[in-house]
Image (cartoon, rainbow, N blue to C red):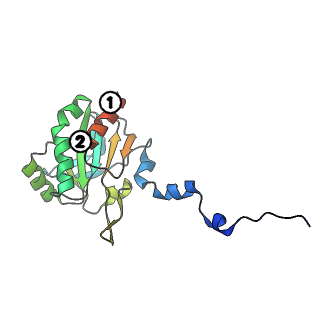
């Protein structure tokens, strides 16, 4: 009877690395290269914003953030505010989205002189469409919330770049570099 080589049990039980990394891939990345999900949301200034209307005049930088008036979200918003002229020069506009109310957005924009629309996704329906409303964990507590994510959408409505799990420092520069690639 011929000898059959046996695979050690420890090796046979390990999942392939490619399989493991696929589960770690943010859901939002699946949108890259695809049409951006359409939406209609109230803004902090009392208007209703539609993605199709925003795209009529150029590219859109759509960023999702967890909460108004928090340290990281304020730093991100102020960085976008300070760099808005450069973004506009590249033919784009910036739009922020969180689950906060339109009133909260109005206060946030007023306090920090934010010069772009903040949209209220109170039921997180748009966040779910974009794959950013996810299970999160802080200090061992698990909860559902918005993962800080930015989408660069071209004027044709195609998601050209996704920045998942955004770290605020240097993020605006990366967004501007992505916009330059669209030219």
Q: Residue furthest right?
A: 1
Q: Nearer the viewer, residue 85 or 76?
A: 76
* Quadrant location of the N terminus in the rendered image: bottom right
- Dot 1 lies on which element? helix
Count of numbered circles on the image:
2
Measured from the top left, where is residue 87 in percent x and y?
Answer: 23, 34
Residue at point 64%, 67% (across, down): 10
Measured from the top left, where is residue 99 in percent x and y?
Answer: 24, 60
- Dot 2 lies on which element? strand
Side of 14 relative to 79 (left or right): right
Q: Nearer the viewer, residue 7 or 50?
A: 7
Residue at point 59%, 62% (across, down): 15
Q: Residue furthest left?
A: 111
Q: In this rendering, is residue 30 above or below 23?
A: above
Q: Earlier in the sequence, mark 2 or mark 1?
A: 2
Residue at point 44%, 41% (across, down): 33
Residue 7 shows up from this direction: yes
Q: Are marks 2 and 1 in contact (CB under 8 Å)?
A: no
Side of 80 relative to 62 (left or right): left
The residue that mark 1 highlights is: 180
Q: Residues within 10 Å of mark 2 (few under 14, many from 20)?
A: many
Residue at point 23%, 45% (across, down): 95
Residue 53 shows up from this direction: no
* Quadrant location of the C terminus in the rendered image: top left
Q: Nearer the viewer, residue 171 or 9?
A: 9
Res 65 → quadrant: bottom left
Q: Residue furthest top?
A: 183
Measured from the top left, where is residue 141 in percent x and y?
Answer: 32, 72
The residue that mark 2 highlights is: 94
User: How far apart are the alpha carbons under marks 2 and 1?
Assistant: 15 Å
Q: In this rendering, is residue 140 above or below 120?
A: below
């Amino acid at each position: 009877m011929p000898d059959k080589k046996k695979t050690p049990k420890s090796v046979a039980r390990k999942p392939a690395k490619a399989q493991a990394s696929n589960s770690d891939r943010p859901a939002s990345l699946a949108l890259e290269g695809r049409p951006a999900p359409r939406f209609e949301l109230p803004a902090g200034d009392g208007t209703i914003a539609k993605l199709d209307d925003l795209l009529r005049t150029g590219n859109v930088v759509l960023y999702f953030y967890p909460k108004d008036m928090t340290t990281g979200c304020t730093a991100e918003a102020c960085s976008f505010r300070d760099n808005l002229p450069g973004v506009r020069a590249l033919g784009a506009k910036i739009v922020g989205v969180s689950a906060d109310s339109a009133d909260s957005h109005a206060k946030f924009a007023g306090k920090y002189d934010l010069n772009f629309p903040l949209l209220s996704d109170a039921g997180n329906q748009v966040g779910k469409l974009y794959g950013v409303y996810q299970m999160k964990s802080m200090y061992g507590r698990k909860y559902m919330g918005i993962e800080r994510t930015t989408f660069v959408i071209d004027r044709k409505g195609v998601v050209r770049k996704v920045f998942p799990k955004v770290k605020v420092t240097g993020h605006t520069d990366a967004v501007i570099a992505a916009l330059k690639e669209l030219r």
